[in-house]
């Protein structure tokens, strides 16, 4: 037989055996036979490198070493999910959906929420080309080499797959494999791993892919994103993914209403302990993809999906001491320092007490025996006190009146739950917190500079605000602890490179209270440059989409402070972007200013997202539902009849995609 044909035949045979074993759980040959065939293929590939194939089954044994994981921007953002904890939460969510979709019948796909490390894998022409961790949802780390070692991840697809798409899922470590790993560690005198989720997540960042290959990781897939996938429902998406070779759990169920959803939830809340993986809830999704597109997203989450979290595990322990932390905005957060206790697989030593009102409501005191749970099984919180175990000499907690860092008297504005330290420019945690926010990944993303280094630079008197970063020299840095020449050069270069960061991210980086990423983009698009924003009045700001009284007041206050104006002036001198790029300005106009559009249906010339962007780029607002304030309804194919009926009843003009494009 021709060598090339033999190699190809072996690869095809091993792929099929791999799929049968790791995806279908139905092996057709023994492990020994599989290993012998794999060894035969490795030997042939070594002797004939001219027939190299990046999708060969031999890639799975690992061996490549990654020193630095490249940061990659997700082509399609990875959103987080809103959580619900009761049937009432789900019913409220269903009502919001019906308000947006009108009378259209809505079904739901229910899937188990597996507790692992989120991953996005890109396939082009049926081949795995890239795997990226969730990161912050906007960008993550390229871990392709490590993901290729996971045997339930297909390197090459089969069937009628789209030309290009991303598939999302969770990298999990089954209980059986986790137990076996820990038995080996204990036998070797090493500390056992704490829980499967953290171990799976840590595995993805191992530098040696051969070590990753030795771990019994699995990848459970649940979502496909991309253009022209040909898929019309979430349930169909799961079925198609299985056909193409992905490991997709078969427990998913199509439900007609929230009662059927709750039946699914209640069944798995009891039976989840029989599963081979950790799971902490159920993800409920609107089944029809067109409905998902109609509903869209909030700044953080899809409106068409909800995570129903199983009741959190609870334990009790002793509250040893209450301490207080100061955030970058001056907000004071009380922290419960606990007697260490094991909770949901991790040792908990601290829990947030949120604010003075929460302490008073639960009458929490030092020395109390408290009930602790993980909110959503992630963040520890105190939910109650065992009064029968309260010490006889117990005294009510007196909330602090002075800042624990700078001893300034705290303030608390009416309607605000938290106390604040008003010493904005003299309180050390606020100073370093603003700088740490400025350099963070979503803001200026300055390479070579981390939170600890910021603390050190401040302590040494080298920086007092973020503009000072641009004045640093290598000579100033070298005498610092743990600062080698290469580290100093990287820090200086990282700061220098940050002048390329676009204006909307600079605006977010400035740390204006209540101005998050989404609001910063809205303000940048509305005002184009920092100079126009600096002189905007409260009334003008409120006219911008999604800007309310509180944000407007905060923006005005920020630009009235001479210290902030001085910092902005120095940043401008160093070349930091203080206006939208020429390219963005070319694509923007004000011709739709003051007009709200609702977009509904399927479009031909541009996608729904592109159409919404065109509205915003030309000064318009995008509304999620029709009201008397709606200017136009842009109607595409397959638009729900209820939207048309409501628009007609309110006398709102209904225009086609082409009529809208003619407007701009």
Image (spheres, rainbow, N blue to C red):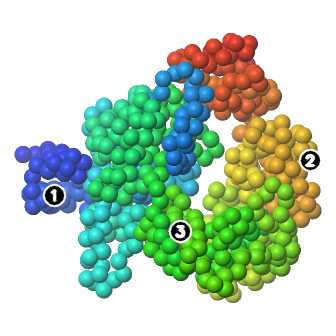
10 Å crowding of disc 2: few (<14), some (14-19), many (20+)? few
Q: Earlier in the sequence, mark 1 or mark 2?
A: 1
Give the percent coordinates (x, y) of residue 550. Answer: 82, 49
Q: Is residue 121 above or below residue 474?
A: above
Q: Nearer the viewer, residue 292 or 149?
A: 292
Residue drawn at point x = 83 percent, y = 63 percent = 412
Can residue 62 be seen?
A: no
Q: Which residue is mark 3?
A: 372
Mark 2 and 3 residues: CB-CB less than 8 Å, in contact? Answer: no
Indicate the secondary structure of the residue bearing disc 3: strand
Indicate the secondary structure of the residue bearing disc 2: loop
Give the percent coordinates (x, y) of residue 148. Answer: 33, 56
Residue 38, labelled with which disc?
A: 1
**Left or right: residue 21 compared with residue 203:** left
Give the percent coordinates (x, y) of residue 523. Answer: 78, 44
**Left or right: residue 237 compared with residue 592:** left
Q: CA distance from mark 2 to mark 3?
A: 48 Å
Q: Earlier in the sequence, mark 3 or mark 1?
A: 1
Q: Earlier in the sequence, mark 2 or mark 3?
A: 3
Residue drawn at point x = 38 percent, y = 51 percent = 269
Comparing labels 1 and 2, the label whose residue is closer to the camera: 2
Q: Is residue 647 above or below residue 177?
A: above
For the C terminus, which image quadrant? Answer: top right
**Left or right: residue 309 compared with residue 480:** left
Q: Residue furthest left?
A: 1
Can residue 127 be seen?
A: yes
Residue 535, labelled with which disc?
A: 2
Residue drawn at point x = 46 percent, y = 35 percent = 258
């Amino acid at each position: 037989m021709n060598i090339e044909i033999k190699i190809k035949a072996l690869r095809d045979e091993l792929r099929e055996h791999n799929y049968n074993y790791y995806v279908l759980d139905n092996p057709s040959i023994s492990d020994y036979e599989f290993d012998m065939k794999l060894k035969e293929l490795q030997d042939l590939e070594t002797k004939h490198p001219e027939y190299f194939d990046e999708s060969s089954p031999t890639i799975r044994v690992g061996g490549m070493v990654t020193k630095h994981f490249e940061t990659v921007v997700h082509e399609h953002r990875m959103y987080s999910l809103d959580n619900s904890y009761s049937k009432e939460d789900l019913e409220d969510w269903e009502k919001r959906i019906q308000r947006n979709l009108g009378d259209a019948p809505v079904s739901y796909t229910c899937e188990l929420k597996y507790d692992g490390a989120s991953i996005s894998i890109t396939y082009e022409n049926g081949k795995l080309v890239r795997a990226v961790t969730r990161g912050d949802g906007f960008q993550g780390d390229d871990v392709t080499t490590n993901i290729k070692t996971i045997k339930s991840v297909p390197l090459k697809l089969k069937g009628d797959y789209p030309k290009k798409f991303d598939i999302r899922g969770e990298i999990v470590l089954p209980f059986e494999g986790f137990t076996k790993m820990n038995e080996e560690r204990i036998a070797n005198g090493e500390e056992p791993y704490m829980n499967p989720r953290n171990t799976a997540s840590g595995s993805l960042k191992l530098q040696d892919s051969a070590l990753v290959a030795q771990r019994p990781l699995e990848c459970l897939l649940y979502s496909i994103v991309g253009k022209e996938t040909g898929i019309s429902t979430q349930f169909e998406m799961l079925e198609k993914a299985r056909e193409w070779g992905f490991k997709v759990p078969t427990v998913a169920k199509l439900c007609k209403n929230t009662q059927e959803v709750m039946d699914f939830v209640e069944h798995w809340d009891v039976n989840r302990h029989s599963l081979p993986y950790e799971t902490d809830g159920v993800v409920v999704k609107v089944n029809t993809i067109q409905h998902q597109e109609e509903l869209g997203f909030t700044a953080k989450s899809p409106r068409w999906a909800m995570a129903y979290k199983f009741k959190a595990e609870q334990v009790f322990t002793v509250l040893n001491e209450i301490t207080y932390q100061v955030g970058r905005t001056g907000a004071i957060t009380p922290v419960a320092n606990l007697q260490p206790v094991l909770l949901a697989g991790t040792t908990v030593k601290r829990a947030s007490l949120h604010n003075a009102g929460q302490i008073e409501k639960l009458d929490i005191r030092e020395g109390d025996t408290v009930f602790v749970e993980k909110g959503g099984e992630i963040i520890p919180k105190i939910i109650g006190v065992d009064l029968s175990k309260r010490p006889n000499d117990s005294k009510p907690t007196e909330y602090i009146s002075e800042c624990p860092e700078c001893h300034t008297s705290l303030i608390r504005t009416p309607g605000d739950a938290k106390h604040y330290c008003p010493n904005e420019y003299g309180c050390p945690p606020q100073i370093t917190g603003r700088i740490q926010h400025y350099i963070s990944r979503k803001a200026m993303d300055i390479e070579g500079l981390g939170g600890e280094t910021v603390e050190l630079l401040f302590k040494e008197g080298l920086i007092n605000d973020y503009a000072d970063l641009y004045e640093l020299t290598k000579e100033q840095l070298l005498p610092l602890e743990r600062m080698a020449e290469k580290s100093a050069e990287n820090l200086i270069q990282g700061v220098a490179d940050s002048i390329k960061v676009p204006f909307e991210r600079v605006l977010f980086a400035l740390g204006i209270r209540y101005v998050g990423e989404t609001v910063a983009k809205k303000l940048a698009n509305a005002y184009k440059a920092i100079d126009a924003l600096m002189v905007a009045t409260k009334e003008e700001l409120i006219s911008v989409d999604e800007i309310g009284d509180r944000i407007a007041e905060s923006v005005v206050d920020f630009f009235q402070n001479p210290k902030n104006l001085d910092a902005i002036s120095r940043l401008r001198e160093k070349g930091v972007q203080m206006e939208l790029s020429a390219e963005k300005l070319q694509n923007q106009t004000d011709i739709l200013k003051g007009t709200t559009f609702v977009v509904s249906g399927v479009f031909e010339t541009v996608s729904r997202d592109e159409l919404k962007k065109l509205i915003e780029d030309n000064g318009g607002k995008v509304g999620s539902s029709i009201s008397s304030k709606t200017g136009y309804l842009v109607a595409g194919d397959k638009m729900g009849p209820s939207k048309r009926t409501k628009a007609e009843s309110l006398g709102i003009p209904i225009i086609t995609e082409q009529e809208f494009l003619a407007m701009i």
